[in-house]
Image: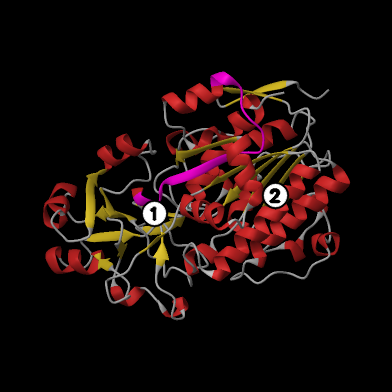
Amino acid sequence: MKASSLTVNGTAYRRPDHPVVVVCIDGGDPAYIEHGVAAGIIPNMERWIRDGFHTVAHGTMPSFTCPNNMSIVTGRPASVHGISGNFYLDRATNAPVVMTGPELLKVDSVMSEFSRHGVQVVSITAKDKLRRQLQKGMDLTNGSVSFSSQHADRCTMEENGIEDALGFVGQPLPDMYSADLSLFVLDAGLKLLAERRPDILYLSLTDFIQHAHAPGHPEADRFYAEMDARFGEFEALGATVALTADHGMNEKTNDDGTPCVVWLQDILDAEFGAGASTVICPITDAFVGHHGALGGFVRVYCHEGLSGQRVIEAISDVPGLEQVLSREDVAREFDLPIGPEGDVAVLGDVRTVIGAREVDHDLDGLKGHRLRTHGSVHEADVPIILSRPVRDEYARRAEDVRLHSYQAFDYAFNGVVD
């Protein structure tokens, strides 16, 4: 029997009486929506902002994709779910460890828990790195589906709950560096909603467009108009639509347009010697062409008797570095799990990114575009938009205290007016 309500990670969620579609717009900085409304190119989002619900919420820090997606789907901060980047350093082996495996996710997602209680769930991501974590614990035997547009040509019933996803959607496999990778996610969700009527859909996009184009650029405008049209189709099919983002996006350049980078490993090697420390850039994943593995948050792991305090004293006055924090302070300030933290966390200012050694970062993939990326507190503001208004107590809550993006499911499931 399908549960009418389930408690997941301390929050009771009502089983939706009509489909709920939660979309994570990767790189969905509020500035894109502000521009889109002013330009009149996103009429559905504009209407929902006016007649539904809208706020700008705190995202999870660091402002990267994996920590924020996991916060959104579990309804909890990173200190609870355990994912605080794409990489951390294993101190025992001194080797970087990929942090995107499902075994590192400490709690269940809302989708997984509902799927195990007879509720049909759809989870579609742009990149497969997220798919496996989001799918952890999901029961695919009762019609639930989980796949990525990246690997839509590899789907099996056993692994994904669907076969021949490309044939089902009726589109070719999208290029990894394209807007189509995200639009495929939305089109697949629309097809599944129309034909199978799942109860819950979580659709997570990719930020290729936002990395490449600022608000107001014709390509960004086209992408937001394309998304908005599809959001309206979800609503027309009877779904409540909830929109949020994993992080924002800022240009990280000098006045001449060149990338504004602090090469932190080079600085530390010059100060303390090669091998005394390791800088980990947790934005790094398999697809770094659009950001060169450069973000606004890095971790420093100390070796051979070097202390975190000495590192803090050595780099606190480096231009472009806004915060230099001990592992205890960064975990406390940003509600992070302390286990994967380095000895020091370093955050850039609004214009600055932080790298390891200059020779280790390839910026050729920018292909002439100005560097736009994320990771710092300046990219941690994200929207929450609902297609329906919320009940008074939920509206008052958002007025009294700034929401977190991990409350999006609570608002979509429990807050909307019946």
Amino acid at circle 1:
Gly
Q: Nearest the camera: 200 or 29?
A: 29
- SS for dot 2: helix
Give residue 7's quadrant in the image: top right
- Nearer to us of marks 2 and 1 is 2
Among the 4 quarters of the image, the one containing residue 22: top right
Residue 188 image position (x, y, % from top left): 76, 55
Helix, strand, or loop for circle 1? loop
Q: Nearer the viewer, residue 60 or 107?
A: 60
Residue 231 numbered tag: 2
Image quadrant in which the N terminus is located: top right
> What is the x, y in percent for residue 309?
15, 47
Q: Is residue 378 above or below residue 143?
A: below
Q: Is residue 326 left or right of residue 338?
A: left
Q: State which region is magenta.
A: 378-393
Give the label on residue 408, or none. none
Q: CA distance from mark 2 to mark 1?
A: 27 Å
Which is nearer the eye, 241 or 156? 241
Give the amino acid type for the residue marked by disc 2 in the picture.
Phe
Residue annotated with mark 1: 375
Report whether 39 appears left or right of 143. left
Indicate left or right for 174 with 399 as reference: right
Compared to 144, does 278 lie above or below? below
Question: Are there few (<14), some (14-19), or many (20+) residues within 10 Å of tag 2?
Answer: many
Q: Is residue 105 visible?
A: no
